[in-house]
Image (cartoon, rainbow, N blue to C red):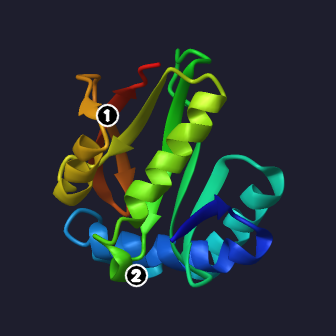
Amino acid sequence: MKVVHAAPEDARAVAEIHVEAWRAAYRFIVPTDYLNSLSIERREDMWGECIAAGEPELLVAKKAGVVQGWISFGKCRDIGSHNSEAEVWAIYVSPTAWSTGAGRLLWLRAKELMLEQDFKSCSLWVFPQNERAIKFYHSAGFSHDGAAPKNFELGGAQLQEVRFVSQFSC
């Protein structure tokens, strides 16, 4: 498996994985009607624009030329964050490629790039019910930092995310 920066022709695969991973990973967290309303076409347009703009930074994991997963990251978007703090904006692997190491390869390459860009830590937000993702984040060196959860509405449901942080040691 190879991890590379996403190219314009990867936008469709990124969008497909985005939608299918949401539907698989969040089926007991996010309302079904919301998950069913997700549009691959709208996500493809959004990711195409992100790839063209270069923000967030977007890497894809490919096996035999087929995108297996992706990670987007950049400067931390949290209010009051420091320039030395990065954030994983999103990471998704196709459910058919779960537990293949694609997510780990994506994280390791993104971390290398973050270190090259002088980031000292990385945060991310996760649904506290997403046990599979939390297990992955723990294995990747992240831990819940105790920050106040983010509460928001999505698809008519009140949801919450908690922040995990990984400190980089040089």
Asked whether residue 48 appears in the rendered view, the answer is yes
Secondary-structure class at tag 2: helix
- 141 sits left or right of 76 in the view: left
Q: Nearer the viewer, residue 66 or 158?
A: 66
In the picture shown, does residue 38 fall above or below 126? below
Q: Secondary structure at mark 1?
A: strand
Q: Label 1: how many residues lie within 10 Å, few (<14), some (14-19) or many (20+)? A: many
Tag nearer the camera, 2 or 1: 1
The kind of residue on which mark 2 rests is: Asn
- Residue 74, image x, y percentages: 61, 38
Q: Is residue 122 above or below residue 9?
A: above
Residue at (64% x, 55% y) in the render: 58
Considering only order in the chain, which callout, 1 or 2, is on the residue closer to the N terminus? 2
Task: Please give the name of the residue rendered at 76% of the width and 67% of the height, measured from the top-left corner.
Answer: 7
Residue neighbourhood size for the residue with mark 2, other residues' Cα within 10 Å, grouped as few (<14), some (14–19), many (≥20): few
Q: Amino acid at mark 1?
A: Phe
Q: Distance of mark 2 from mark 1, alpha carbons?
A: 28 Å
At 20% from the left and 59% from the top, the residue drawn is: 132
Please tell me how many numbered marks the rendered image carries.
Answer: 2
In front of the other: 63 or 86: 63
The residue carrying mark 1 is: 164
**Any part of residue 34 in sight:** no
Q: Is residue 97 left or right of residue 15?
A: left
Residue 8: % across, % down: 78, 70
Residue 101 percent coordinates (x, y) = 36, 65
Q: Position of residue 31 (x, y in %)?
A: 29, 69
Looking at the image, which residue is at 54% across and 49% down?
Answer: 109
Residue under pointer 2:
36
Q: Report whether 168 appears left or right of 110.
A: left
Report which quarter residue 164 is drawn in.
top left
Against 149, residue 9 (above or below) is below
